Image: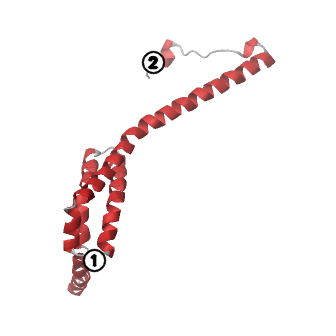
Amino acid sequence: MKKGNIFLYLVIAVPLGLMIVPTIIVLAVALIPTGVAFIMERGKGYYGGITVGVMNLAGTTPYLADLWFGGHTVDGAVDIITNVFAWMVFYGAALFGWAIYSTTPSVVSTFMAMTAGHRITALRGQQRELVQKWGPDVESVYEPSSDESGSA
């Protein structure tokens, strides 16, 4: 990297960084539950962190919009992070993300069990029709023997 390029990058990056300081202040406070979720979900696919993060960011968005369109200043950011109701929205949205993340597996497993039960009922009905059409010789129940069902 040439010395002239470093100077160019600094000329662009420093003013850009200074312009987003109020946003960074609000996000640093508001997205703490997201960071915790990513730390807790280490190595498990980060689905909890993503779910909590999206809901947490959704709770932060109205306050960021107020900051951006109402004067993007550090004082505005401090006003937001010292507002108790803003904290309730930030962390309430994150809590809702945790609720979604923790209840989704049980809802999905219940749905899959219901679907499998309906499928079993439908297949048994088809089996009865086949027995009526072809006779009892086509009816058999597969029972794995003890040596087949054991682990390999």
- Say which amino acid is labelled 1: Gly
User: Residue 84, image x and y in percent?
Assistant: 22, 57
Q: Nearer the viewer, residue 29 or 14?
A: 29
Q: Which comes before the other along the chain, label 2 or label 1? A: 1
Tell me, for residue 53, which label it has, or none.
none
**Residue identified by numbered label 1:** 71
Tag count in the figure?
A: 2
The answer to whether 57 appears left or right of 128 in the picture is left
User: Residue 26, image x and y in percent?
Assistant: 24, 65
Q: Is residue 98 depicted above or below 16 in this figure?
A: above
User: Residue 36, image x and y in percent?
Assistant: 24, 49
Residue lying at 25% horizontally and 53% vertically, measured from the top left: 35
- Say which amino acid is labelled 2: Gly
Res. 58 in view: yes
Res. 31 in view: no
**Residue identified by numbered label 2:** 150
Q: Is residue 40 depicted above or below 71 in this figure?
A: above
Examine the image and state in which quarter residue 143 appears. top right
Count neighbours of disc 2 (C-alpha within 10 A) and say few if under 14, some if 14 to 19, many if 20 or more: few
**Do the numbered discs 2 and 1 sit on residues whose CB atoms are within 8 Å?**
no
Q: Report, in whole angstroms, how far the alpha carbon at label 2 lies from the one at label 1.
A: 69 Å
Examine the image and state in which quarter residue 100 appears. top left
The answer to whether 106 appears left or right of 136 in the picture is left
Residue lying at 26% horizontally and 51% vertically, measured from the top left: 33
Q: Nearer the viewer, residue 17 or 62?
A: 62
Q: Nearer the viewer, mark 2 or mark 1?
A: 1
Given the current orientation, which residue lies at the most extreme right position?
133
Rendered-image quadrant of the C terminus: top left
The answer to whether 59 appears left or right of 135 in the picture is left
Examine the image and state in which quarter residue 130 appears. top right
Q: Is residue 83 depicted above or below 133 in this figure?
A: below
Q: Is residue 27 depicted above or below 19 in this figure?
A: above
